[in-house]
Amino acid sequence: MAKKPQLAIDTRPWRDPKAKPFVRIRNVTKKFGDVSAVHDVSLDIYKSELFCLLGGSGSGKSTLLRMLAGFETPTSGTIEIDGQDMTQVAPYNRPVNMMFQSYALFPHMNVEQNIAYGLKRDGLPKAEISARVAELLALVKLQDYGARKPHQLSGGQRQRVALARALAKRPKLLLLDEPLGALDKKLREETQFELVKIQETLGVTFIVVTHDQEEAMSLATRIGVMNQGEIAMIGEPTDIYEFPNSKFVANFIGSANMVEGVVTEDEPDHVRIRSDELGCDIHVGHGVDCAPDQILWWAIRPEKLHLSRDKPAGIHGANVTRGMVEDIGYLGDMSVYQVLLDSGMRLRVTQTNTVRGNPDAITWDEQVYVTWGDTSGSVLTV
Amino acid sequence: MTTAHEPTIPPPRRLRPWNAVERRLARVGITGRMLVLIAPVLWLLVFFLVPLAVVFGISLATKQFGRPPYSALLSTEEGTVQLTLHLSNYIRLFTDNLYVAAYLSSIRIAAIATVITLLIGYPMAYAIARAPDRWRNILLMLVVLPFFTSFLLRVYALTGFMRGNGVINQFLGLFGIEPLVMMQTDFAVYVGIVYTYLPFMILPLYTTLVKLDTALFEASADLGARPARTFLSVTLPLSMPGIVAGSMLVFIPAIGEFVIPSLLGGPGTLMIGRVLWDEFFTNTNWPRAAAVAMAMLVVVVVPIMLLQRAQSAVVEK
């Protein structure tokens, strides 16, 4: 039994300033004509991490991945992998393998030949190749499918062949371009855990590109959120969700209610923000880097808001507002309420449906109070 | 809140007269699909199968003077209908060395020309398929452009290049190089075939190459294959359907080519198309010419059928 490798998820090397990054991207810019697809990106990724590059289409995440694979050369900046400068190295000389979004399985080769392709290029002896192929087929649970052609496989099976082929050469770094994008929802959820399991058993560093934030949240040790060719935020999934650093990140990840406000009290232990949109003051129970009368934004997740029929106490006369239930979306596990405030603003509030078929649930056109804790929201200055 | 169910909307009704017609036809076993097929089937029957049968009939007659210049297959003598089939034309094809040599020579010339066309056409098709979008259509247009002038004219124009005092020799003369003898040689025939049939090679190759996912090449490079290895292991096998289609489109008509060998070739260029022409027009031996044509059909069709079977077997695998 092989010893379980030391995993980045447990050691969190990014919290240690002395840790040596495995992939070092320094000031990388990529221009296509006049358009910069990636603009001055610097990023450190540590060994055995499962790093997700998350962004919408055109955010530059795929271009960044393709530069790591060597299919594109940066216009400026350097890419270092395992201490070696890879910026100008051809794809076939890199210790990196990629799993393509379309899988890019060779249609004229069967599953075994596809997996063996990279091993043959290394000139390994035949016996070793077939042993390695058998091992990989077992890893992705496709032992009986070795002789099949790609077109005889289902989408999920093809995805696993693509993964096995990319892992065959035991790369130091595996790049995955939307690895689950072509699968249906249920299969995607199963495969997510499978992917994490394989990554943890092998201890290979994974860089995953995805536009699906749920996928990024459940896979990643850390997420890099990309926007218009730049990195908007890097952090662990909880950091990104609970402590977004900008309006863009707060809006891009999950859903958020965002209001504009003016600072009325700026103390080291609390801040008070007046918001006309919200129709009440916001009491923030920690210090914020801001100045009195500064205009800033405050964002709160729908599940951090509470609804009640009776007026709650609030905190220091703040954090309570009133509105009318305009719409309810019943999702089974929870309900999404749209509450219309007096200012005309709509708040999105989610409530877990803990009681089965609750007859006393808040319903349409009811007057309700909305309240929240003093550390539930994020104060954003950009 | 419950919503009352709307009364179900009746399915749309089809026009009555068509229903009636369709029902009546269906009773005799005729469906719409068969009606659509009638036009092409009739066309092929009248302009392909019937003439082919006529040629086959003529090939079983013998030469005679008069009109038509061959004997009738059916004759009535003393109240009995006699069917006379002469196999002498076919026997002659095997016994006379001229025909065997002409067939072999045609196949050889067509095969060599096909290989040359492939070697020139493949890089061109590859370049067009990989060209930026805005260039692709222009390049394809340039490939097809020669079709806008007459085939005969283009072949004839080649003589202006290759004859003793033609463009090429005049150019070589500037450097004091002795004029080359190009006309009336097999070389000129190859130039003619390759030049005129190149588009037929490029177009099917292009359609196969342009469909190949570039991610496949990237995947190959990613797995450690240098460009040459990627070409041999990925590009070439995946473009095989295009190679086969293009080669067939060049090889088959090149075997029976008549115009190019007569305009560019010399007396030594033996091709079956010319033999056929001579039998038909010079010797006025229609039955022999018909037998030559039928034999050519067999020579060409049999390998194609074998090849297609092999191809479909590969596809099924």
Image (cartoon, grey):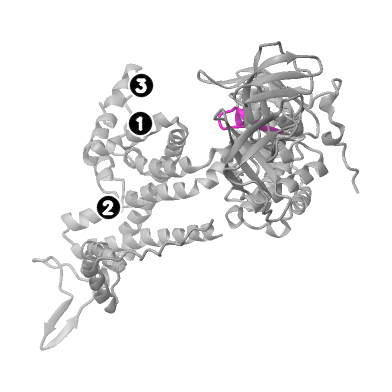
Taking depth in this image into account, of B157 and A144 the one nearest to the observer is A144
Distance of label 3 from label 1 (alpha carbons): 37 Å
Residue ID at (34%, 22%): B172
- Check disc 1 and give the amino acid type: Ile
Q: At which x and y percent is residue B295?
A: 32, 63
- Check disc 3 and give the amino acid type: Ile
- Label 2 resides on the chain identified as B
Residue ID at (60%, 28%): A63
- Label 3 resides on the chain identified as B
The disc, 3 or 2, on the residue closer to the chain's N-terminal end is 3
Q: Which residue carries the number 3 mark?
A: B177
In which quadrant of the rendered image does the C terminus of chain B lie?
A: bottom right
Q: At which x and y percent is residue B258?
A: 26, 48
- In the rendered image, which quarter is residue A303 located in? top right
Residue ID at (66%, 25%): A280
Q: Is residue A61 magenta?
A: yes
Q: At which x and y percent is residue B250?
A: 37, 47
The answer to whether dots 3 and 2 both sit on one chain is yes
Disc 2 crowd, CA 10 A, few/some/many (<14, 14-19, 20+): many
In the image, residue B181 above or below residue A295? below
Nearer the viewer's eye, disc 2 or disc 1?
1
In the image, residue A235 above or below residue B218? above
Distance of label 3 from label 2 (alpha carbons): 35 Å
Label drawn at residue B273: 2
Residue placed farthest to the bottom in the image? B79
Do residues under tags 2 and 1 come within 8 Å of each other at their CB atoms?
Answer: no
Label drawn at residue B138: 1
